[in-house]
Image (cartoon, grey):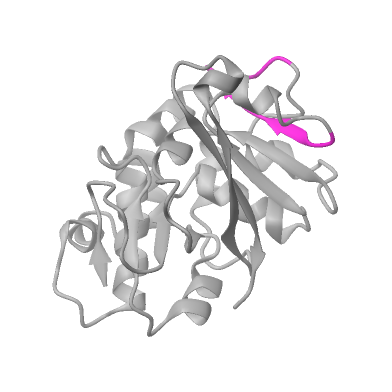
Amino acid sequence: MRLDLCRTLSPTPLVLADALEGGVVTYLLARGAREVLIAPGPRVAGLLKEGRRLLGESEGFPLEGAFARPSLLDLERAPIAGESFVLVAPSLNGSLLPEEKEVYLGSFRNALALLQALRGQALTLRPAGAPLPFLSALVVAGFLCKRLCPEAPPNLATALLKVFPDPQEALFQSPEGQALHRQGRTEELARASLIGVDPVVPRLDGVLPFPKAEYGLSQDRWVYRFVAWNG
């Protein structure tokens, strides 16, 4: 088991750990979504939204033209089965490298499915936000590390579990959790901290390049396509 805090190219299958946006991806695929494309920003997402439903927000409000916010509560009443989604998630998108081929998303919500599918394999765990990982993602990484490889030496992520043994408290105390709390969205933290309720593992199923010269962007961009996988 290897913990990557620097976003270096993984020599083994990669598990990207994320509690909030990663939990939304897991929820969508568990509800029967055909795919979730993780876009770096609204401009690239706009190039992909034909035939797909756009999820994104800015300062707590849905992006212009978005189907909904990437909110577990908002999506509870939404038609999801059979639909394709584009999720505007710059930090989650920026946590991956386009050269990485075998990538899985891990959160509290799909922890049991992930453990059943990947236990015993040589893996790299990377908290979302790396090289400046989110506190909430670090706690998810520690939770998964302790269960995927209980004999592994202590690391920063597993040490955080001693400070935050309760997943919901860990999310609430994180800066990203506090941002949701200030918006009156604390219930979303409770949903994101549920363990093992989504029986799927999002797996990378392709990388879509968007060269800056062709699309008039400031730099080359990539979009990551995830589909449901159960091992």
133 or 229, which lies in front? 229
When the figure is inspected, residue 214 is found, relative to residue 226, above or below; the finding is above
Which residue is painted at 49% across and 67% down in the image?
A: 111
Give the left or right position of residue 110, taking residue 159 as reference: right
The answer to whether residue 67 is seen in the rendering is yes
16 or 138, which lies in front? 16
176 or 119, which lies in front? 119
Give the image quarter of residue 165: bottom left
The answer to whether residue 42 is seen in the rendering is no
x and y, in percent, of residue 22 in the image: 52, 49
Give the left or right position of residue 41, taking residue 1 as reference: right
When the figure is inspected, residue 185 is found, relative to residue 158, above or below; the finding is above
Q: Quadrant of the N terminus?
A: bottom left
Give the left or right position of residue 228, taking residue 15 as reference: right
x and y, in percent, of residue 63 in the image: 66, 18
Which residue is painted at 41% across and 46% down in the image?
A: 96
Number of numbered tags placed on the structure image: 0
x and y, in percent, of residue 188 in the image: 56, 41
Does the magenta segment cover residue 95? no
Which residue is painted at 29% across and 62% down in the image?
A: 142
188 or 107, which lies in front? 107
When the figure is inspected, residue 207 is found, relative to residue 165, above or below; the finding is above
x and y, in percent, of residue 52 in the image: 79, 37
Instruction: State which region is magenta.
Output: 51-64
Does the magenta segment cover residue 54? yes
Q: Quadrant of the C terminus?
A: bottom right
Which residue is painted at 65% across and 27% down in the image?
A: 45
